[in-house]
């Protein structure tokens, strides 16, 4: 019997179209969310649920990393896989450094020019007075003035060193450092998987996430969960705690690696998941969880109102008692949001936030169809819309870097021209078009068009 021919050449893994589509959508949302003064952000998906575009970016990055690096570990060995991760960390690190200094240059120019063209002195205030007129101090607004001045005994050169060593991570610039730390965890997770199996590796991920939760840390006698120092002059830690967010990343990584099975695609499950997502809305949408008179209450005031001193006591307190009889309908959402915030918060990825993302991701995964077949629109607008979003998702790093700088510039324009509907539509729309053009330009550069021209000229065609 003739044996079929075999080949040792690995078959390239087809890229999941859903990965780039949803990551592209996330890039547009991130751009709008980072734009100062952009009231469009009141209506982005993050305002109707705990999770937002950050989860999309991190989850899809985990999936993409499984495609790019996961199989590399299995096919070439742990050392080569770790070296490949190191190379990627090197790229992302310098992208982060470049992003910081380009943005710094922009806000220096904005602060000097301001809306009136007057010069503003560098100081720690959000506003400065130029010729008797108060204008934005954009360096102070972004909170990166510390690179020019001593802060709490930390001189400018130490602060500069903090930028280069990632021990100073301003809030706008914390996504890429978070990604760097998570990338560094990939060799650790793959090493554990190789030595003890996938379930042990996934257990390690869960343990690290638990240790990042402040509540769990306090049970262990620690003041707060594990995190990274965010600045040399204070005890502040990274807003995006990489040890919390790695759970989202490795969830996507595990699905793409095949460590986790695909969930069943049943419409009854989809309906249940969608209903759960809707239950989150009253606790997320500002117009609902605040009362009609713009109710705001601190956690301490909330617990004092009900005569409780701790979260566990609040949990035990029955909600049918007279204490809650006079609450306005909207107020109860705010009370629950305040007192259970540690389960919803963004920095460490609270469990309710993580579950919201999983339910939401399941709904859209099911709606996209097997292999993303429902994204294959046949009409002209739908087909080109998906194609464009795919392209943006494929070039997510370049688009993200551009979006951060562009969002700050667009916020500057908003300060000058105002926030009317036509102007806001024009500013947001122009920014999105620029991001699309960047995605196509970078994609074209990656095809090495100069090589094609060189080959054409060398063959005389």
Image (cartoon, helix red, strand yellow):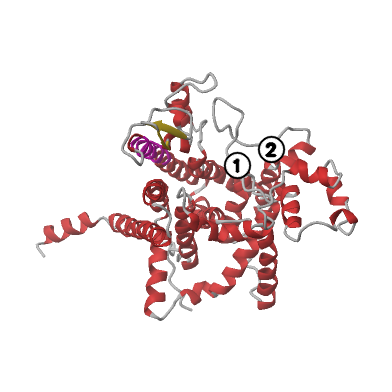
Percent position of residue 214, x then y: 71, 40
Residues in magenta, as a range: 96-111
Say if 81 sits above or below 169 in the image. below
Write down the residue under mark 1.
Answer: 241
Secondary structure, mark 2, is loop
Write down the residue under mark 2.
Answer: 225
Give the mark nearest the N terminus, 2 or 1. Answer: 2
Main SS of the magenta segment? helix
Say if 55 sits above or below 178 in the image. below
Q: Is residue 67 magenta?
A: no
Say if 249 sits above or below 12 in the image. above
Percent position of residue 422, x then y: 39, 62
Percent position of residue 341, x then y: 71, 48
Say if 137 sits above or below 413 in the image. above
For the residue carrying disc 1, how many other residues have a C-alpha within 10 Å: few (<14), some (14-19), or many (20+)? Answer: many
Secondary structure, mark 1, is loop
Looking at the image, which residue is at 38% across and 66% down?
Answer: 388
Percent position of residue 365, x then y: 57, 69
């Amino acid at each position: 019997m003739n044996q079929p021919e075999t080949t040792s050449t690995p078959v390239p893994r087809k890229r999941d179209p859903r990965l780039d589509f949803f990551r592209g959508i996330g890039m547009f949302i991130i751009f709008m969310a980072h734009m100062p003064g952009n009231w469009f952000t009141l209506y982005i998906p993050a305002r109707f649920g705990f999770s937002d575009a950050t989860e999309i970016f991190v989850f899809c990055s985990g999936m993409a990393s499984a495609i790019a690096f996961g199989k590399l570990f299995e096919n070439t060995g742990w050392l080569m896989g770790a070296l490949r991760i190191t190379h990627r960390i090197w790229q992302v690190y310098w992208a982060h450094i470049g992003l910081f200094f380009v943005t710094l240059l922009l806000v220096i120019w904005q602060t000097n020019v301001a809306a009136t063209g007057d010069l503003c002195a560098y100081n720690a205030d959000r506003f400065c007075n130029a010729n008797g007129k108060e204008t934005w101090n954009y360096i102070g607004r972004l909170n990166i003035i510390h690179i020019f001045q001593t802060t709490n005994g930390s001189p400018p050169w130490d602060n500069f060193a903090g930028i280069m060593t990632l021990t100073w991570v301003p809030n706008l610039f914390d996504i890429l450092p978070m990604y760097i730390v998570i990338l560094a965890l990939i060799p650790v997770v793959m090493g554990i998987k190789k030595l003890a199996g996938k379930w042990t590796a996934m257990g390690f991920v869960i343990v690290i996430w638990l240790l990042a939760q402040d509540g769990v840390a306090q049970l262990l006698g620690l003041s707060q969960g594990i995190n990274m120092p965010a600045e040399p002059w204070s005890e502040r830690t990274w807003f995006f705690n990489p040890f919390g967010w790695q759970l989202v990343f490795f969830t996507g990584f595990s699905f793409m690696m095949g460590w986790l099975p695909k969930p069943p695609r049943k419409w009854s499950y989809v309906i249940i998941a969608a209903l759960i997502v809707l239950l989150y809305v009253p606790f997320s949408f500002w117009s609902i969880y605040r009362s009609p008179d713009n109710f705001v209450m601190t956690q301490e005031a909330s617990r004092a109102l009900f005569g409780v001193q701790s979260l566990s006591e609040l949990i035990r307190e029955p909600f049918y008692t007279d204490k809650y009889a006079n609450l306005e309908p909207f107020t109860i959402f705010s009370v629950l949001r305040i007192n259970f915030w540690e389960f919803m918060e963004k920095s460490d990825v609270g469990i309710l936030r993580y579950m919201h993302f999983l339910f939401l991701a399941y709904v859209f995964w099911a709606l996209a169809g097997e292999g993303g077949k429902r994204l294959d629109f046949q009409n002209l607008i739908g087909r080109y819309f998906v194609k464009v979003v795919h392209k943006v998702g494929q070039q997510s790093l370049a688009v993200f870097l551009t979006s951060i700088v562009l969002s700050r510039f667009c916020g500057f324009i908003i300060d000058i021209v105002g926030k009317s509907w036509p102007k806001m539509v024009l500013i947001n729309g122009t920014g999105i078009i620029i991001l699309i053009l960047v995605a196509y330009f970078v994609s074209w550069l990656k095809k090495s068009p100069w090589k094609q021209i060189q080959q054409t000229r060398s063959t005389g065609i």
